[in-house]
Amino acid sequence: MWSLRLLIREICHRFPGFFLGFLAVVAAVALYVGLETMGRASYRETKRLMRNLGFNLLIVPEGTDMADFWAADFASGDMPEQYVRRLAESPGMLADHYVATLQKKVLWEGREVLLTGILPERSAIDARKKAPMGYSIARGECYVGYAIAKSPGIEPGKTINVLGKDLTVARRLLEDGSKQDIRIYAHLHDVQDILDMKGRINAIEALHCLCAGASLPDLKQQIAKVLPGTRVTELRDIAAARSETRKMVEQHVELIVAVVLVVCAAWIAFLALLNVRERRQEIGILRALGFGSGHIAALFLGRAILMGLLGALAGFFVGTAVAMHYGPDMFKLTFSAVRPPYDIFIPTLLVAPLIAALAAMLPAVIAISQDPAVVLREE
Amino acid sequence: MTVIHLHSLTKRYRGRRGDIIALGDVNLSVPEGEFLAIRGPSGSGKSTLLLSIAGMIHPTDGKAVVNSTDIYAVSGRQRARFRAENIGFVFQMFHLVPYLSVLDNVALPTVLLPGRIRSHEARELLAHFGMSERLTHKPAELSTGERQRTAVARALVNHPRLLLADEPTGNLDPDNSAQIFEYLADFHHQGGTVVVVTHDPLVERHAQRTVSLSQGRLISKEAG
């Protein structure tokens, strides 16, 4: 108790020095907390942006000639529909958002269209209630591409006949400038009925996971085990953009935090050294009165720990407030979902004083090893 | 009973031009209840001798027995404890802790002893030294005489058997110097042992014995 009293009185007496150290801890912790909060927001934002770019993985039957695939935009072979469920139920997969598709080029109303059946996705993420990717089309309904929608009589609510099956137009799609404009999307099972391919699909689209260690070779190995007789193709532009963005964000945050930590620790050590120099006589007299090394070290380490604790407390709230204030402007899609990082509050309160104490260790050792007789004889 | 017994106490420092002898083969006994003055020119080793008696300068040779304890034969921790319990120290520059009040400065050594902090004893001592009005003042707010009275009160608060004073009146005017020597004499009259390093002639009124040091050697023993 008396040691705490000494500590607090000394801090009040030499407040500017303590305050400078405190500010350094506040700055370091605020930066860390701010970057962590922004990093999480950035991670979510990147995921959302990348998801918006569309699927980046394609799983097709093994024998598919990819030259034909890219020419026709669908695989000539097929595979069981239950593959999707098998994938979705496999734990630890490095991909998500599986969508089963069955596509064929057919003649409709005298023109070639791409009839595309899709199954509202099934995957482990369904349990997390995430919004599914791709269209979720009810049975008996269809979405029509822009070029087809221009035909007379194609209105939402109207019924069209596709190769003998009536489908209600639920939505007309906007112009995309791609093959999507000549597609008719319908529920997978309706398309299977139309094409007489019950239980079959010819591609699974998926999203490669945005997480550490999710390399394509690993994913291919995983899928080969779960779905023998298939091949995995990565849509490189999209995948590369995702990977680069993710790595850039993570590396920058790690580097900045590391540099700031080192600078802050060096600053605290420097201030602690100044404090030891300033208190040489005080250390001498405390020694002369009978205070041992433990008492002397406690005064210096306690000062650093208190500095770290108070700095961490203030820094956490400053960093959170700054991130929450500026975040919405930076991450327009996802910031509302990011909360103050309370999960790192306690670790921050423990680690910051620890680092401050480590930084003050050398000055404390110098204080302990200082010969009081030398100081006391200097008078 | 002998309170201090120095046997062939020697302290050498290594210098560029060879060893520097701060204390050379000093033999000295101080019986309990004695008031001893140590005199000598600047650099003669007086402060080194006093700090050696206090267990703060490890001798190169010889031994120092204080209150029957060979203080350099025990651990640093035990020595610190021994100092807190047995020795009071007064310095020329007072060496008060600048951020503590007068009362806290005087109570500070009691932290090291078992039991609660003896603030009431610190108050009584300060009242005895005419410092009751200054209890909450910081050292910087005191006159030099008041600072030294505070320092003497701090040295006495743990009821030491031995009081060591290094030029306690070196920075004081004659009136304050006389007062400080009166306080040391009071302690001595109550049975305490006083060893004081000083150039002040006022010490002659109180010292029972005076010894002189020159170049680290005890060169004379005089009756006080």
Image: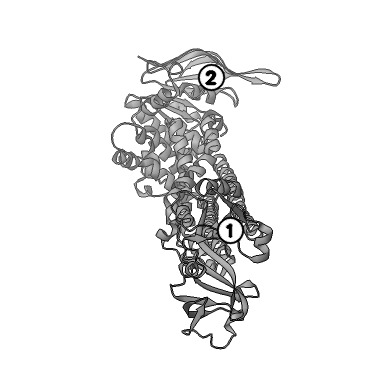
Viewer-closest of B175 and B211:
B211
Q: How far is the residue under mark 1 from the one under mark 2? A: 113 Å
Image coords of residue A35 (percent x, y): 55, 57
- Residue matched to label 2: B212
Which amino acid lies under the numbered mark 1 shown in the image of this protein? Answer: Gly
Closer mark to the observer between disc 1 and disc 2: 1
Image coords of residue B20 (percent x, y): 64, 19
Which amino acid lies under the numbered mark 2 shown in the image of this protein? Answer: Ser
Residue A333 visible (yes or no): no
Label 1 residue SS: loop
**Chain letter of disc 2 in the image:** B
Q: Looking at the image, which residue sits at the far bottom?
A: A152
Image coords of residue A346 (percent x, y): 42, 50
Q: Is residue A30 left or right of residue B182?
A: right
Which quadrant, please, contains the N terminus of chain A?
top left
Q: Say which mark, if any, is on residue A77.
A: 1
Q: Say which mark, if any, is on residue A119.
A: none
